[in-house]
Structure formats: structure tokens, C-alpha cells
Image (tube, rainbow, N blue to C red):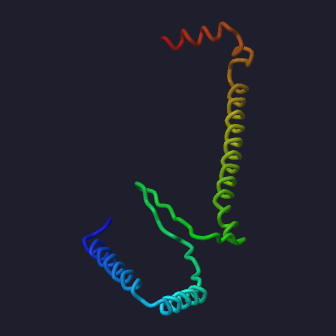
């Protein structure tokens, strides 16, 4: 979002750039060549700054996201990026094992109920028993 000050600064910058450009056209050839050589030397000597790891943060609704800079692909960064995936896989395996244990316990409880009930297990497979249960539920 631009403010009023940003617009004034942009206008001032444009005016200065126009004045410098106009003034550069009137300089003698030898001075423009020296300036060109000095610019090339300055560009060659400039320090390459180390990029920041986090370039920015964006938000959309209630979610935040970090945007990373550069090609920093060290071993630690690769391992750190795989940790959430590893945690997800371990969590899913734990949930699967718990569900399997719970299902086995539930089946054992049903078998115990069937074997200790007054009715023999063959009564549950009798077609008349299903009819008996449906009429019993209506009453």
C-alpha cells in the first residue's frame, strides 16, 4: 500500500534521475569513459551479500507462510525439510497400530459375549432369530 510520502519520494527520485541523465549527455567523452571504467571497477569489487534465509512472510486468512530465499540446499536444510514428513508417517503408523489393537479388543469382547451368553452361537445364524429380533424391537 503506497502512502502519500512514498509517492512524493518516487516523484523526487524521478526528477533527480532526469536531471542526472540530462547532465550526463553534456559531459565530455573522456569523463564519461572514466566514469564508465569506475563503474565497472565498482561493480567488480562490490560485496556479494549473503542472502537472508527468510525472504518474507505472507498471510492469507488465519494461515502464515514463510518464503525462503536462495538455493541453500545444505544437508541440514534437507533433513529439516523432511522432518515434518517423517513425523506425519510415524503418527500415521501409531494411529494404525492403535486402531488395529482397538479392533482386535472389540472382536475379543464380542466373542466373549457370544460364548458366555445363554443362547448357543448357532442361534444367531438361524433365519427365525432375525425375525424374532425384529418383532421384539417393534414391541
Above/below status of 71 relative to 130: below
Residue 18's spot in the image, x, y percent? 35, 78
Instruction: Tell me the quarter of the picture where residue 10 sits.
Output: bottom left
Q: Nearer the viewer, residue 50 or 14?
A: 14
Q: Is residue 32 left or right of residue 53?
A: left
Above/below status of 39 relative to 15: below
Instruction: Tell me the quarter of the picture where residue 107 sits.
Output: top right
Above/below status of 52 relative to 31: above
* Identity of the residue drawn at 71% across and 14% down: 123
* Identity of the residue drawn at 67% across and 42% down: 99
Q: Is residue 49 left or right of residue 26?
A: right
Residue 12's spot in the image, x, y percent? 29, 78
Total number of numbered discs in the rendering = 0
Q: Nearer the viewer, residue 46 or 138?
A: 46
Residue 5's spot in the image, x, y percent? 26, 75
Q: Residue furthest left?
A: 4
Q: Nearer the viewer, residue 107 or 77?
A: 77
Q: Is residue 122 left or right of residue 50?
A: right
Residue 14's spot in the image, x, y percent? 33, 76
Instruction: Tell me the quarter of the picture where residue 84 sits.
Output: bottom right
* Identity of the residue drawn at 36% across and 81% down: 22
Q: Is residue 128 left or right of residue 51?
A: right
Q: Quadrant of the N terminus?
A: bottom left
Amino acid at each position: 500500500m503506497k502512502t502519500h510520502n512514498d509517492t512524493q519520494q518516487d516523484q523526487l527520485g524521478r526528477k533527480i534521475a532526469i536531471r542526472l541523465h540530462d547532465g550526463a549527455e553534456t559531459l565530455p567523452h573522456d569523463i564519461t569513459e572514466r566514469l564508465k571504467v569506475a563503474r565497472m571497477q565498482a561493480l567488480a569489487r562490490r560485496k556479494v551479500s549473503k542472502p537472508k534465509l527468510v525472504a518474507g512472510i505472507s498471510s492469507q486468512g488465519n494461515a502464515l507462510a514463510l518464503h525462503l530465499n536462495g538455493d541453500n540446499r545444505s544437508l541440514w536444510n534437507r533433513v529439516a525439510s523432511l522432518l515434518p514428513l517423517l513425523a506425519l508417517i510415524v503418527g500415521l503408523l501409531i494411529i494404525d497400530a492403535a486402531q488395529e489393537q482397538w479392533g482386535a479388543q472389540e472382536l475379543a469382547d464380542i466373542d466373549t459375549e457370544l460364548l458366555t451368553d445363554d443362547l448357543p452361537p448357532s442361534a444367531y445364524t438361524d433365519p427365525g432369530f432375525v425375525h424374532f429380533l425384529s418383532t421384539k424391537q417393534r414391541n
